[in-house]
Image (spheres, rainbow, N blue to C red):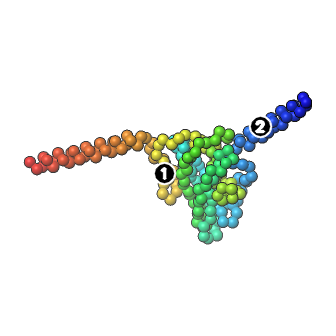
Amino acid sequence: MRMKKIVGLVMGCAVAMLASASGMANKPAGTTEGVTGGAGTILDGTMNVQIVNGCYALIEGVVNTPNTGGTVGAALNFWDDGNFLTSIPLTFAANGSAQSYCQVYQQLVPVLQGAAGVGIYLEDAEGLASIQTFASVGDADLSNICTGPAPVCVAGGGPAVPLPTGNRIGFALLVFLLVGAAGFWIARRRSALAR
């Protein structure tokens, strides 16, 4: 009877260790990072992630495309504790050049507490269809509730430019006061000219 308890305790500890080890990564194992893309995909790419207000990720980078004509694809995939969240598909001209991209992602659901943050992966396909990972940030800290405006990317890709954070009500009040002051000044000016 005592041996059964010991075996049960050891097995329980082993299962707990495996569960905690599997929770250490946001994306399950099985992709090969840094390998050349397959047909119809980019050749390779980079990714830089900037967190704004703790809930937005500005993701920018450069990809290299094959010179095959037409278009090739890639995707930004988002994972949290082994759970697939969403994808942002990317399309590039297959003209053998380096091309920039810039995307904004908003974390809309609470981040799970197994592995740190959210995993962001530049890959050859969307979600579970992806085989190759070209670049990744495995622990993007997107744990806040959004309080400021969403950041924006420069048109056509390029460096991400976050909008200033602040109180929208305060900004609206400032605009209202400025418009009111301008209206008051115009009314006084007209009144003075009419005399």
- The residue wearing badge 1 is 152
Q: What residue lies at 8% left-to-right and 48% top-to-bottom?
A: 195
Q: What residue lies at 52% left-to-right and 55% top-to-bottom?
A: 158
Q: In the structure shown, which secondary structural element does the residue marked by tag 1 occupy?
A: strand
Considering every residue shown, the one lying at the far bottom of the view is 69
Q: The N terminus lies in which quarter of the figure?
A: top right
Q: What residue lies at 67% left-to-right and 48% top-to-bottom?
A: 83
Residue 35's quadrant in the figure? bottom right
Q: Position of residue 101 (x, y in %)?
A: 56, 56
Decide: few, some or many residues near mark 1? Use Cα within 10 Å; few <14, some 14-19, many ≥20: some
> In the picture shown, does residue 23 fall above or below 65?
above
The mark closer to the camera, 1 or 2, is 2
- The residue wearing badge 2 is 16
Name the amino acid type tagged 1: Val
Residue 44 appears anywhere in the view? no
Residue 109's quadrant in the figure? top right
Who comes first in sequence, dot 1 or dot 2?
2
Residue toward you, 103 or 173: 173
